[in-house]
């Protein structure tokens, strides 16, 4: 046996072990690691994600099966399976012209429009102002102060506004002490919608700036330098550099907001509804609670909730399609 044959045998053996049959167990057709191999390689990350995934499945997706109540005359003492099937009878309140439902729908659409016009742009404007602060320490202090209201419950927020703007609140006490006429804000049906919007702005605007500030930090500073060389001032730099730089984030958040556009703050409104009455304060969420749950119309409550979900999905898909037409990624891409 020659030395050449002795040296070639191990190589042939290694070639046999590393052949296509064995490689196919861990590699895909394109040479990338197989699906099971990728799961094994990222097992620690998957274990970290597992608790959150279970929570979402248990409290968000499994309850969707309960939407079958919308097609039944649901009675709690009978249960879902034993309750009578009524088809689309529970949906008649939506298309039959029920005045209470129409009033709730009208108020919801008005508040949705007001929030889209005033609440959604507020974090963008605040993020632009915070981004213009050059002293980082001052910026961090201001951000921390603005974030705090987000962590307060609506019970506390409503109580604070009552202490400030109520009939015996700080503002009216100051006006009385200085012989000025008092103003009626809390409990006034004419100012109720503006009060709701102002509460949302005060509570959530600071927290909502986080994503916009993160998007602003990704804009290349050389773009501002080039714009400055071309003679662009602060406003033109904002219009031609800053806003285009965060346009993708703005569109993404706006699409997501559309999906929840028919939910305008149940807890916030129900806490203040007694002071102004249902005519001006009833929205779809409070209508479901008052007419559906309190009055025992479970099937109608489920039907309205299901209809809201369907409308939200349609709005998200439609807005996402429009975003693709204008060259933006949107929520998802094909």
Image (spheres, grey):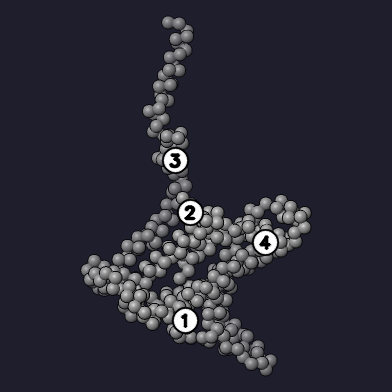
What residue is pinned by disc 3?
A: 38
Mark in the foreground, 2 or 1:
2
For the residues labelled 2 and 4, the Cα–Cα distance comes to 27 Å
Q: Which element type, helix, strand or loop, lies under badge 2? A: loop
**Residue 133 in sight here:** no
For the residues labelled 2 and 3, the Cα–Cα distance comes to 23 Å
Cβ atoms at labels 4 and 1 below 8 Å apart: no
Estimate the x, y position of residue 249 in percent, counting from the top left. 57, 58
Taking the image as shown, residue 173 lies to the left or right of residue 306, namely right
What residue is pinned by disc 1?
A: 281
Q: Vertical placement of 255 versus 105: above or below?
A: above
What residue is pinned by disc 4?
A: 239
What residue is pinned by disc 2?
A: 332
Mark in the foreground, 1 or 3:
1
For the residues labelled 4 and 1, the Cα–Cα distance comes to 38 Å
Which quarter of the figure has residue 206? bottom right
Q: Which element type, helix, strand or loop, lies under badge 3? A: helix
Which quarter of the figure has residue 26? top left
């Amino acid at each position: 046996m020659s030395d050449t044959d002795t040296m070639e045998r191990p190589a042939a053996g290694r070639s046999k072990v590393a052949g296509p049959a064995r490689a196919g167990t861990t590699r895909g057709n394109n040479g990338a690691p197989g699906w099971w191999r990728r799961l094994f390689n990222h097992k620690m990350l998957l274990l970290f994600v597992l608790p959150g995934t279970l929570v979402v499945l248990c409290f968000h997706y499994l309850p969707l099966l309960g939407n079958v109540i919308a097609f039944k005359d649901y009675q709690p003492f009978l249960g879902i399976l034993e309750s009578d099937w009524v088809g689309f009878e529970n949906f008649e309140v939506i298309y039959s012209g029920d005045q209470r439902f129409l009033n709730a729908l009208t108020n919801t659409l008005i508040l949705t429009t007001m929030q889209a016009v005033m609440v959604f742009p507020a974090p963008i404007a605040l993020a632009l102002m915070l981004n213009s602060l050059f002293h980082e320490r001052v910026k961090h202090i201001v951000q921390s102060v603005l974030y705090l209201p987000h962590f307060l419950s609506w019970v506390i927020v409503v109580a604070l506004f009552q202490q400030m703007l109520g009939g015996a609140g700080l503002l009216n006490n100051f006006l009385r002490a200085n012989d000025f006429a008092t103003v009626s804000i809390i409990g006034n049906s004419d100012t109720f919608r503006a009060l709701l919007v102002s509460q949302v702005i005060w509570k959530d605007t600071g927290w909502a700036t986080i994503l916009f500030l993160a998007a602003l930090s990704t804009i290349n500073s050389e773009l501002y330098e080039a714009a400055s060389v071309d003679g662009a001032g602060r406003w033109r730099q904002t219009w031609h550099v800053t806003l285009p730089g965060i346009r993708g984030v703005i569109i993404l958040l706006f699409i997501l907001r559309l999906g929840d556009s028919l939910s305008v703050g149940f807890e916030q409104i129900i806490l203040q509804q007694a002071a102004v009455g249902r005519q001006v304060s009833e929205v779809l969420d409070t209508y479901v609670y008052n007419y559906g749950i309190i009055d025992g119309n479970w099937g109608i409550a489920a039907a309205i909730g299901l209809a809201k979900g369907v409308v939200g999905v349609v709005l998200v898909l439609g807005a996402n399609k429009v975003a693709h037409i204008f060259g933006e990624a949107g929520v998802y891409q094909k």
